[in-house]
Amino acid sequence: MAQVSSISNEQTSPTSKLITLRISRFNPEHDESSGFMEFSVSYEKWTTVLEAILDVKKHHDHSVGVRYSCRQATCGSCGMIINGKPRLACFTKISELNSDVVTVEPMNNFPIIRDLAVKFEKLFDTHQKIKPYLIRDDTEIESNEKEFLQSPEEVEQYIQFANCIKCGLCNSACPTMATDSSFVGPQALAQAYRYVADSRDKGKDSRLKIIDDSHGIWRCHFAGSCSQVCPKGVDPAMGIQLLRGYMLGFRS
């Protein structure tokens, strides 16, 4: 695909600056390979990468494919590679990148739908596979008991991992996923730990059996890339290591 340069005609403010936004373009239905289109976009110190992409869609090329929703780092929809690193476009300010050129590409390790949008089916399938919900026997609930209370110490064991927004950035950064398409991935493993470590849950044994597989927890090489890119401060690498403690009988 040939590069195309387009200069913004929008009125800029005295405080605005210009960056070159390089957007990866690829439609697997008719393109043989991907390429980049370049646009000159004005931005302020608060402008996010997502806002710059939407400016291009509005004023230059309506066909740019990008997924987004909440615009406040909550839904996890706008994950992409920004200047070589998996990030949320709505959470990444252009001014923080310290570069006159911003390159955006689709996340690694995911099939491409078009341009910056990728398919999440496998992410959701593996997430469901580890049973991401509390498992209990209803007979344990007494008639006068309405909730299972936890101490602050019990909550602390898993609460960090409950912040996962399923954006897929950790899976995109994972080098193991790049070489093993059947690997369950750091997102699912971290969520398996979230429930195993929850004192209210009784599904530990069934979850450990699910991930005790050659493409499961033992496939992780502990590169730590997943934890470096999480926008919510979750540490999947630590969760996986703690989960191995349960697998090896060091934790109960």
Image (cartoon, grey):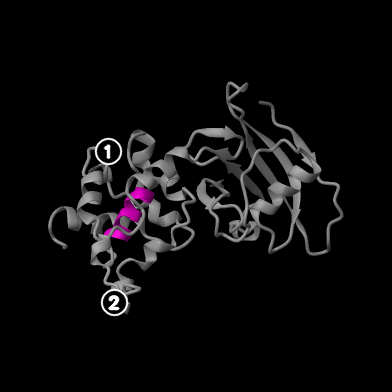
The circle on residue 153 is 2
Q: Residue at x 50, y 49 (%)?
A: 86
Q: Residue at x 44, y 58 (%)?
A: 164
Local crowd at mark 2 within 10 Å, few (<14), some, or many (≥20)?
few
Task: Name the residue tied to disc 1.
Answer: 215
Q: Is residue 220 left or right of residue 111?
A: left
Helix, strand or loop for disc 2: helix
The image quadrant of residue 220 is top left
In this orientation, does residue 238 appear?
A: no
State the image coordinates of residue 244 (x, y, percent, origin top left).
21, 54
The image quadrant of residue 62 is top right
Q: Residue at x 13, y 60 (%)?
A: 250
Q: Is residue 13 above or below residue 115?
A: below
Q: Is residue 75 above or below residue 147?
A: above
Q: Quarter holding the C terminus?
A: bottom left
190 part of magenta stretch: yes
State the image coordinates of residue 180 (x, y, percent, origin top left).
33, 34
Q: CA distance from mark 1 to mark 2?
A: 32 Å
Q: Which residues fall within the magenta stretch?
A: 186-196
State the image coordinates of residue 40 (x, y, percent, origin top left).
75, 45
Q: Label the magenta part by its dominant secondary structure.
A: helix
Mark toward the start of the polypeptide (1 vs 2): 2
Q: Quarter holding the N terminus?
A: top right
Q: Amino acid at mark 2?
A: Glu
Q: Is residue 247 above or below residue 63?
A: below
The circle on residue 70 is none
